[in-house]
Image: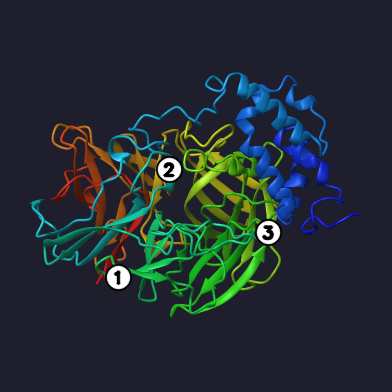
Amino acid sequence: MTESRNGNVPHGGHEYEVWDAAYVLDALSDTDRREFEMHLAGCSSCRESVAEFEAIAPMLSLLDEEPATVPPCPDLLPSLLAKAGQRLAANPVELQPALVTSTAVAAETVFPVFRTGNYAPVHDELTTFDLPVGGRIPAELNGWYLRNGPNPRSGGGHWCVGDGMVHGIRLENGRAAWYRNRWVRTQSFDNPIPPYNDDGGRNLHSSIANTHVVRHAGKTLALMEFALPYEISDDLKTLGAYDFGGMLTDSMTAHPKICPSTGELHFFGCGNIFEPHVSYHRADADGRLTISRPIDVPALTLMHDFALTAEHVVFLDLPLLFDLRVAFSGSFGRDLPYRWDDQYPARLGVLRRDDPYGQLRWFDIDPCFVFHVVNAHDVTSPDGNAIVLEVLRYDEMWRNNSEFGTDAALWRWTIDLDTGLVEESQLDDRGVEFPRIDDRLVGSSARYSVAVGSGALIRYDLQRDTAVEHRFDGAGEAGAPGEAVFAPAAGRPDELAGWYLTYVYNSVTDSSDLLVIDASDFEGEPVARIRMPRRVPHGFHGNWIPD
């Protein structure tokens, strides 16, 4: 009997039945492994069989046979269990399965794996009024600075998967009126929900909502890319999942883009085991979902960010793929289920904004991975048409585990829309992450971007390809900064007319401050230093939300 890859037939009597053990024991070729993973997405019986094998993975080392020589036959599982049982009975203490462990990464790195130092969580929620201020908060700064990040309530594990906590400061009339920190209480916060249903479909209400917080059409949304957004109030109370009035049946990326010209919200959803693995969505300025369409990618890639220009949307299809073996291993929380794949091509997909249901053009690039796009813009000249993207590029990511062992650096990709080629060039060799621009210039030729480096904020001049630093290793300003968000001065379009807001942690005093840095004097002393009632753990992304 033959079935389609996404078919679902009773166990026994179909062509993939004998592949289960070979898959677990890594005895399939790369081609067969990928074919079987596609089949697994639609075959519950094979998924159950693979899960059974993975459950006894620690016992496989007890076998005398080398894994690659074990025949993939349906009688293998009883044989494995029998052999393992005999050996375990003979020496039960020595052969107990060991916990999965990994080497911790130093706390001062930009991206750690485990929760140490200021990557460790805080354990309760505070509300504090009239925070002490050193210097002077500009009277023009009236609004909220909100920042999201992982803050697990218990246990150890990978920093990226902690429960979301939003830290917020209200600034008004030169005062730091209040500080609050609140967990995002998703539907799965008190009663965990598996991210996938029994039929393999996603439960979009299963969320830790820990990556970003944005405002569009009057709603403030806490985001993580594999679930629905969660709406929160101005005082950080969770209001519930938001699905655009029932129109969104997909996840929402943690990095949506708001077009400064139209007010439209552009985003994508990803994480589907079934095709389509990625879909593109657009909401108008009033928050009505107007466009949803699939994006054809051959596998479930980790697509964290994308790019928007005045005329195009650009998707990043890169060789970091969902790995069922890691997912089935039971090590989630300490090892994320994605692995680098040398056989998967890296490419950029370009879609015209005025033809949102049209065909994507794909452009090949050198293998790499990108978590964060700096910005992108169109170039039209007598010499041709192009799209310019600045990105923070890793040479590779998560080949053997999900530790962050390498740094990203600033690169520029120039997509020649006439020749179909991409020019790739590295602009700086410093290790950086969390880039931000003046959000009023998303999709146009922004001049400045600020990223987090080692003990410094680095501001890049993207037009002159130069950089300056605001360092935090001086006697009065020691500390580790987080993402720096630009708060523009009202009514002034100049990128230097405004302030950068960033949380800075001081390991000597185990405390945090919110610093306000004048964009026109980036290397100078902050104009204000707001004392937090206690440390604010390192997190991901946030926004300045003006009145």
Seen at 87% across and 51% down, the residue is: 13
Residue hosting label 1: 233
**Circle 3 — which element?**
loop
Neighbor class of circle 3 (other Cα within 10 Å; few <14, some 14-19, many 20+) is some
Q: Give residue 343's position: percent from left, percent from top.
A: 72, 38
C-beta proximity under 8 Å, tags 2 and 3: no
Q: Give residue 155's position: percent from left, percent from top.
A: 37, 41
Of the two numbered discs 1 and 3 on the same chain, state the one appearing first in sequence. Answer: 1
In the figure, is residue 166 to the left or right of 363? left
In this rendered view, identify the residue nearer to me: 361 or 24. 24
Neighbor class of circle 1 (other Cα within 10 Å; few <14, some 14-19, many 20+) is few
**Which residue of the protein is positioned furthest toward the front in this rendering?**
89
Q: CA distance from mark 1 to mark 3?
A: 34 Å
Seen at 86% across and 48% down, the residue is: 15
- What label sits on residue 274 in the rendered view? 3
Identify residue type, mark 3: Phe
Residue 380 in view here? no
Residue 96 in view here? yes
Residue hosting label 2: 465
Q: Give residue 111's position: percent from left, percent from top.
A: 41, 38
